[in-house]
Amino acid sequence: MESTLILLKPDAVEANLVGKVLSRIEADGMRIKQLKMFSLTEEEAATFYAEHQDKEFYDGLVEFMLSGPIVAAVIEGLNAISRMRKLMGATDPREAAPGTIRGEYGTGTPKNIIHGSDSPESARREIPFFFEQEAKLNE
């Protein structure tokens, strides 16, 4: 079993797509292990996306992630990271395959509905960022 983090971005929440996206994950045989909705602070958004700080899209991404509530979830399943990456589709919805989450619902970048960990290393860093207290409670 493998765990990965997903974030349903403000555009997903605003468009009432949370249930549809989570249903697709469950239909693919993965489990939702932890789930919460909240709004990021500017410090949290800047810290989470710090690896992109020198890229031209950074400021717009942080601003977008502050524009409304998000849903964070820990997804578990066999090869969950690669399966979620396939289910999400390419980062740019215009390049995402038909039938993927981004291909079906995304309108551009950063308005591509969903973030997902891209590697086991990223998942190990990202999950505790949003679920640190919850993880301690489950120890």
Image (cartoon, grey):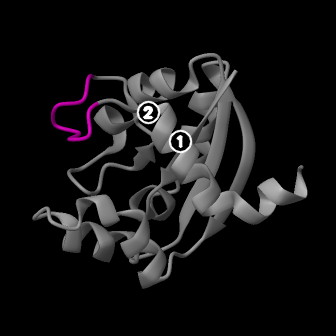
Between 57 and 133, the residue placed more toward the observer is: 133
- Percent position (x, y) of residue 83? 49, 21
Residue highlighted by disc 2: 119
Say above or below: 124 vs 27. below
At x 24% / y 50%, what residue is drawn? 107
Residue sitting at the far left: 56
Q: Which mark is residue 78?
A: none
Other residues around mark 1 within 10 Å, as few (<14) / some (14–19) / many (≥20): many
Q: Decide whether residue 96 is among the magenta residues.
A: yes
Q: Amino acid at mark 2?
A: Ser
At x 44% / y 82%, what residue is drawn? 43
Q: Quadrant of residue 132?
A: bottom right
Q: Which residues are magenta?
A: 90-97
Q: Amino acid at mark 1?
A: Ala
Between 93 and 40, the residue placed more toward the observer is: 40
- Percent position (x, y) of residue 38? 61, 71
Q: CA distance from mark 2 to mark 1?
A: 6 Å
Q: Is residue 116 visible?
A: yes
**Dots 2 and 1: beta carbons under 8 Å?**
yes
Q: Secondary structure at mark 2?
A: loop
In this rendering, would 73 be left or right of 89?
right
Q: Decide whether residue 135 is among the magenta residues.
A: no
Q: Is residue 17 visible?
A: no
Q: Main secondary structure of the magenta part?
A: loop
Q: How many labels sit on residues? A: 2
Residue highlighted by disc 1: 123
Q: Quadrant of residue 111?
A: bottom left
Q: Secondary structure at mark 1?
A: helix
